[in-house]
Image: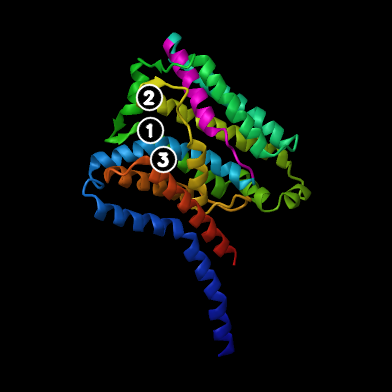
Amino acid sequence: MNGVNISKLAQKPAARTVLKNYIPAIVFLLLLIVSSILSDAFFTSQNIFNLLRQLSGTTIVSMGMLLVILTGGIDLSVGSVVAMTGVIFSYYAASSNLATALLMAFACAALAGLIAGYFVAFQNMAPFVVTLASMTAARGIAYIVSKGTPIQIKNPIVLAFGKGSIFRIPFPVVTAVIIFIIIWLVLRYTSFGRFVQAMGSNETAVKLSGIRVEYYKWAVYVISALLCAFGGIISDGRTGVGSPNIGNGLELDAIASCVIGGASLSGGRGSAPNALMGVLILGMIGNIMNLMNIAGYPQQVIKGVIIIAAVLMQRSKKS
């Protein structure tokens, strides 16, 4: 009898942990139901596809942010890197050819990630400070290249990528799904993913096991920047211009999405599916408020409340 009681007691914390891991999905489903009740226009195909297209860039950037957060870092430069790579891509797409534009956009993104990652990983500088400096520099480069004016894109391939679809699914959404699957597989099934998560949990222990954590930490900042290049190119295709103003506040949306999805800002905990749930939750809140003709400022207040609630839920997970 005692054995049975002990086993039941042992199973309760495990069941509670499993339930808490699904909190983002539960919140998403509840929000889905509430949104469908509040507005008849929510579940229309046009609204759903527009919402998914708008969230594709945020999803891609959030996947990179997740990798950084898992190591215990933060990347405040993602919005500015999206703007910088988008402007550089549009500049070369207008003045040269598409291959050159792609090469320059991804090369500049990689360079930005290499520089920021180097100072964080090898010079032990605080990620907040390094990426804050990168944010300012990248936005400045975007304004210098564009001369403060949006650069129009006329390349039909780029415009088709941003606005076209395959089997009625927008190309940006397809791209976001592919990148999400790659990040999910990397974190779940590769040694790189396991080391990244272990670094956030106990970096000292990983070092003592003989792993060069500096290179893994460096790599996540490079990957984050490269994913920002995807975000910049998608934005160019959707809007038809490369603007130095795009990406403002994107870093906050990406961080909030990861936190709402249960990622710990101290590192070591988080998953790609839950981060995706965080993106969808934030996006749905903005979408339903737009459908209800509510101004943008209340949306910012609600986002702040949601972030606080997500952090409180994280604290309850530890108890």
Magenta span has 109?
no
Gap between marks 1 and 2 measured at Cα: 9 Å
Left or right relative to 91: residue 34: left
Q: Residue 224: percent from the left, percent from the top?
A: 56, 35
Q: Quadrant of the N terminus?
A: bottom right
Q: Residue 201: percent from the left, percent from the top?
A: 66, 53
* Secondary element at image label 1: helix
Q: Which residue is mark 3?
A: 177
What residue sits 25% from the left and 47% below the top? 43
| 36 relative to 116, above or below | below
Q: Main secondary structure of the magenta part?
A: helix
Gap between marks 3 and 2 measured at Cα: 17 Å
Q: At label 2, which amino acid type do we have?
A: Gly
Q: At label 1, which amino acid type do we have?
A: Pro
**What stretch of residues is rendered in magenta?**
73-94
Looking at the rendered structure, which numbered label has been put on residue 237? 2
User: Quick one: label 3 or label 1, which is nearer the N terminus?
Assistant: 1
What residue sits 58% from the left and 30% below the top? 135
What residue sits 55% from the left and 51% below the top? 263
- Residue most extreme to the left: 40
The reply to whether discs 3 and 2 touch (Cβ–Cβ < 8 Å) is no
